[in-house]
Amino acid sequence: MLAYLLRRIVYALPIMLGVALVCFALVHLAPGDPLVSILPPDASQELQERLTQLYGFDRSLPEQFVSWVWRALQGDLGLSIATSRPVTTEVMTAVVNTLRLAVVATVIGFVLGCLFGFVAGYFRNSWIDKLASLLSVLGVSVPHYWLGMVLVIVFAAQLGWLPATGAGPGGSDEWAWDWAHIQHMILPALTMSVIPMGIIARTVRALVAELLAQEFIVGLKAKGLTSFGIFRHVVKNAAPTALAVMGLQLGYLLGGSILIETVFSWPGTGFLLNSAIFQRDLGRRDPDLAGSAHRPCLSRSGRHAERDRRSRQGAGRAVPALAGVLGLRRRALHPGPGGRRSGHRRSAAARDGRVRALARAG
């Protein structure tokens, strides 16, 4: 397992390098001068040339790319053009905020998805099943950025129950798990949890419906096990698949939260990337773009490794069984010295013994 995972990571290195090259090229092909945001309107030509040399924009694009990759491998992502702060510090702060929001959204989606999935599976082909299935389909189909704007209009602008934007009174730097900060997380977390909720609900519904139709459930009912006991058995069998789907959805939320974070001004990686794009902050755009593209690549490598491991385990269990079946068929088709021929001899000897006994009795 570990060797295969390492091999997949090695195979992903050329892909990551290609993604970094494409992101670097797209960033520099965009129109505009990145130094406009920091230069005053009456800046002299000498000041412009000095800043251009300071940030390395006077070199060719291949030289800039090689220098950026080499410094990135050493952990130095440079300084932000807009804020003059280290890019590593800004990116790590944004990653923590995105991870915090994604974990809360995944937990909400997992709880609601399992609830709808179990209800739909237990009451399959009923109006409850249809209602739960409709909610899960809507969760997957509705654009989450549109849903976020609707929630802001209803709960923030109209009702005034929750704040619309931001990460709390003190921002993300002074985050604490109190109501003053948690209320800023409710709307973006609910919006982000809709898609995982729909996917998990559909998965759990199919698992529960399949488990309830299996023979061991019928046997448990015949033994007089209570409904709660049967429910526990169903949960134990459905939990591994549901947890695996939840882990995959967490990876997707970490890499695709730019629209939700922009709608709610949540200071995560998506909001940071959006700000860097509009400010033409090349120091922040390159690592954000490359990181957003590399996370799904590594996630797929882990999923392929787990899938191949299960395939090998399944093959390892199936080969001995198949060999046993083939061995039985081979022995039946090609009996050995003690096989069918010895059986015929024993039958003939028994028949002769019965004939001799009848002759003596006569």
Image: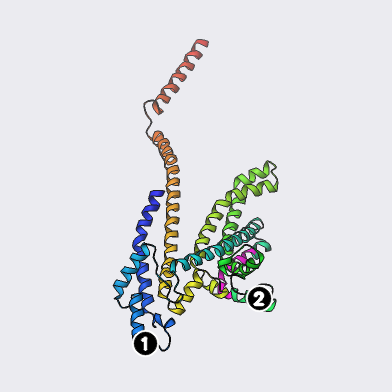
| Disc 1 residue type (three-letter) | Ser
Q: Is residue 53 above or below residue 17?
A: below
| Disc 2 residue type (three-letter) | Ala
Quadrant for residue 67, please give it: bottom left
Q: Which residue is mark 2?
A: 156
Element marked by disc 2? helix
Quadrant for residue 193, please give it: bottom right
Quadrant for residue 346, please give it: top left
What residue sits 43% from the left and 85% below the top?
40
Q: Is residue 227 above or below residue 337?
A: below
* Disc on res. 65: none
Q: Residues within 10 Å of mark 1 (few under 14, many from 20)?
A: few
- Magenta span includes 137: yes
What residue sits 44% from the left and 81% below the top?
37
Q: Residues within 10 Å of mark 2 (few under 14, many from 20)?
A: some
Q: Please state the horizontal and vertical placement of residue 209, each as a whole percent of the image.
A: 61, 55
**Residue in front for this viewpoint, 321 or 25:** 25
* Disc on res. 44: 1
Q: Is residue 187 above or below residue 113?
A: below
Start and end of the magenta stretch?
Answer: 132-146
- Magenta span includes 130: no
Give yes or no for contact between labels 1 and 2 (Cβ–Cβ under 8 Å). Answer: no
Nearer the camera: disc 1 or disc 2? 1
Q: Earlier in the sequence, mark 1 or mark 2?
A: 1
**Total numbered badges shown on the rendered structure:** 2
Q: Is residue 235 visible?
A: yes
